[in-house]
Amino acid sequence: MEQRPQIVLKATLGDKILESLGWLTLFLLWCLIFVNYNKLPAIIPVHYNTLGKADNFGGKETVLFLPVIATVIFIGMTILTRFPHIFNYPVKITEDNAFRQYTDACRLILYLKFIIVVIFGIVTFKTIPNTAGTSDGLGAWFLPLTLGCIAIPVIYYVVQSFRKV
């Protein structure tokens, strides 16, 4: 593996705000589960098809997997951003471009971990009324919106990486 510069990045105000919003969203996801857990029926939707319709069901304890997985992903990505020199980059990292590439990559991960927690929150938020029959699935909009929210910043980052070589 090539030797890359190891740089400690300073978070901007925008980075700190997005990080705080991510932690707040994660906290609210856990609150949503704790407030509603006892109200859930014994069987709940545990999987949705591409049209957002529930197509598999399981015990209500499975709803706990959503915040657990979101928390593990969020914390894992938070730790990962401390080591930008180990990331895979679409361009060769040099002393001249390391700071910019590391900053952009960490910002991408910051955005992605926030959107992942939001996605898990939406699934949880929509699952609860689905169990009561007051809502019908996630909606056909969910998959395209989710894919767009993840793909658009990744594509933008890759394009910017090549522009800032």
Image (cartoon, rainbow, N blue to C red):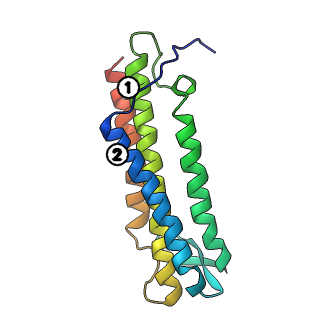
Which residue occupies 53% across, 85% down?
A: 131
Dot 2 alpha-carbon crowd within 10 angstroms: few under 14, some 14 to 19, many 20 or more: few
Left or right: 8 in relation to 64: left
Which residue occupies 64% across, 15% down?
A: 1
In this figure, what is the number of numbered marks?
2
Amino acid on which disc 2 is placed: Ile
The x and y percentages for residue 34 are 56, 74
Indicate whether 53 appears above or below 150.
below
> What element does badge 1 sit on?
helix
Amino acid on which disc 1 is placed: Ser
Indicate whether 72 appears above or below 55.
above
Left or right: 19 in relation to 48: left
The x and y percentages for residue 164 are 33, 20
Answer whether residue 116 is visible to the viewer in this image. Answer: yes
> What element does badge 2 sit on?
helix
Image quarter (top left, top right, bottom left or bottom right) of the C terminus: top left
Q: Nearer the viewer, mark 2 or mark 1?
A: 2
Residue named by callout 1: 161
Of 101 and 51, which appears nearest the observer?
101
Mark 2 or mark 1, which has the lower sequence index? 2
Which residue occupies 49% across, 68% down?
A: 123
Q: Which mark is residue 81?
A: none
Which residue occupies 57% across, 63% down?
A: 67
Task: Measure the C-alpha gap from mark 2 to mark 1.
Answer: 24 Å
Indicate whether 67 appears above or below 134.
above
Residue named by callout 2: 17
Answer whether residue 53 is visible to the viewer in this image. Answer: no
- Disc 2 and disc 1 in contact, CB within 8 angstroms: no
| Corner quadrant of residue 76 | top right
Dot 1 alpha-carbon crowd within 10 angstroms: few under 14, some 14 to 19, many 20 or more: many
